Image (cartoon, rainbow, N blue to C red):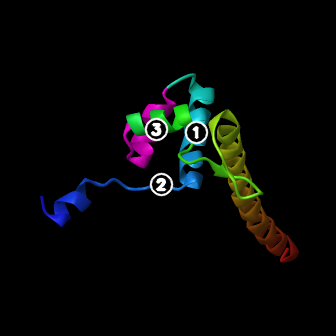
Amino acid sequence: MSNSNVNAAKGRRYTAKEKAEIIAFVDKVNADKGRGGQSAASKKYKISPLTISSWIRTGPGTGVISSGGAAVAGPIGKKLSKLQALHDQIAKAEKELSKLKAQFNSLKSAL
């Protein structure tokens, strides 16, 4: 087998942050609809449902890096990953809200 075939067999590597985001998406869909999160994530992110299932069982890959720099795995790591994903979503939403408030105030002052 040539090197190009070996490299072609390797899949994409996901960061702990990406895995946590995908797991958070699965959890959100499951919370909203009762089920179907894995299938929805598989379609949205173009990832095998088996891969997502593995991440859910073991936590997001190698774990989440704690403030001390050590990887945290298992249920605690899973919760920390979800917290990180939620924090990132909140920060993004706050940034967008800040932009909207600035636009609102600009239009309001132009009246």
The residue beneath circle 1 is 59
The residue beneath circle 2 is 14
Q: Please identify the residue farthest to the top as the structure is shown.
A: 34
**Label 1 is placed on what type of residue?**
Gly
Q: In terms of secondary structure, where does tag 1 sit? A: loop
Residue 59 placement, left or right of 108: left
**Label 3 is placed on what type of residue?**
Ile
The quadrant in which residue 30 appears is top right
Q: What is the C-alpha distance between the residues marked 3 and 2?
A: 11 Å
In this view, 34 is above or below 3? above
Please report whichever mark, 1 or 3, sits nearer to the chain's N-terminal start: 3
Q: Nearer the viewer, residue 26 or 102?
A: 26
The residue positioned 58% from the left and 39% from the top of the image is 59
**Which image quarter holds the N terminus?**
bottom left
Q: In terms of secondary structure, where does tag 2 sit? A: loop
The residue positioned 56% from the left and 33% from the top of the image is 29
Magenta highlight on residue 32: no
Question: Within 10 angstroms of label 2, few (less than 14), some, or many (20 or more) residues?
Answer: few
Question: Within 10 angstroms of label 1, few (less than 14), some, or many (20 or more) residues?
Answer: many
Please report whichever mark, 3 or 2, sits nearer to the chain's N-terminal start: 2
The residue positioned 42% from the left and 39% from the top of the image is 51
The residue beneath circle 3 is 52
Please report the bounds of the magenta region as a residue range: 36-49
